[in-house]
Image (cartoon, rainbow, N blue to C red):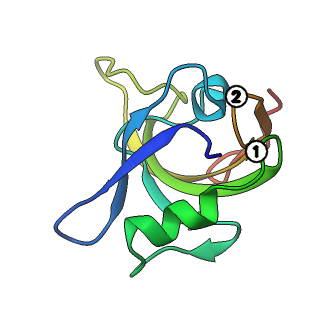
Amino acid sequence: VGVGINVEKNDEGTLRVSEVVEGMSAHLSGAISVDDEVVQVGGRPVQGLSIEEVAQRVKGTDGTPVQLTLRTVRRTDGFTKAKEGSKRVPRDLEVTLLRGAWGYVDYFDKGASSIPM
């Protein structure tokens, strides 16, 4: 069982989230968006791995935790939607999700302080 994201590899070999499945943990966390880059799974880099190898790392027993590190672009106020005058900055997020449709355990924005959810 996964966390409810689909990924695609772009021309540079970067894995990007192409879909966040409604009702699954990634969606319930609210922390993962389409176009976020998957950087690590379980604290291990995914650079150079195939989509299938990354999927193997993400998938596991229903309800068990998995930590994802994602590189994302958020506005400086933390929201993703464009707003006139807002600055968009890349940041790394660490999200611990429960596999399946359970939700999330923890969410840490490495560019800010810990955010309880």
Q: Which residue type does callout 2 highlight? A: Ala
Residue hosting label 1:
113
Q: Nearer the N terminus, badge 2 or badge 1? A: 2
Q: Which residue type does callout 1 highlight? A: Ser
Residue 30 falls in image quadrant: top right
Residue 64 placed where, x, y %?
Answer: 83, 48
Q: Nearer the viewer, residue 104 or 116?
A: 104
Looking at the image, is 108 positioned above or below residue 13?
above
Residue 18 falls in image quadrant: top left
Q: Residue at x 55, y 30 (%)?
A: 78
Looking at the image, is 15 positioned above or below residue 79?
below
Query: In the picture provided, is 10 more to the left or to the right than 3?
Result: left
Question: Given the current orientation, which residue lies at the most extreme left position?
Answer: 11
User: Which mark is drawn over residue 101?
Assistant: 2
* Label 1: which secondary element: loop
Q: Residue at x 79, y 43 (%)?
A: 114
Residue 83 placed where, x, y %?
Answer: 33, 17
Looking at the image, is 113 positioned above or below residue 77?
below
Q: Residue at x 78, y 51 (%)?
A: 61
Residue 20 placed where, x, y %?
Answer: 46, 32
Query: In the picture provided, is 67 more to the left or to the right than 93?
Result: right
Decide: few, some or many residues near mark 1? Use Cα within 10 Å; few <14, some 14-19, many ≥20: few
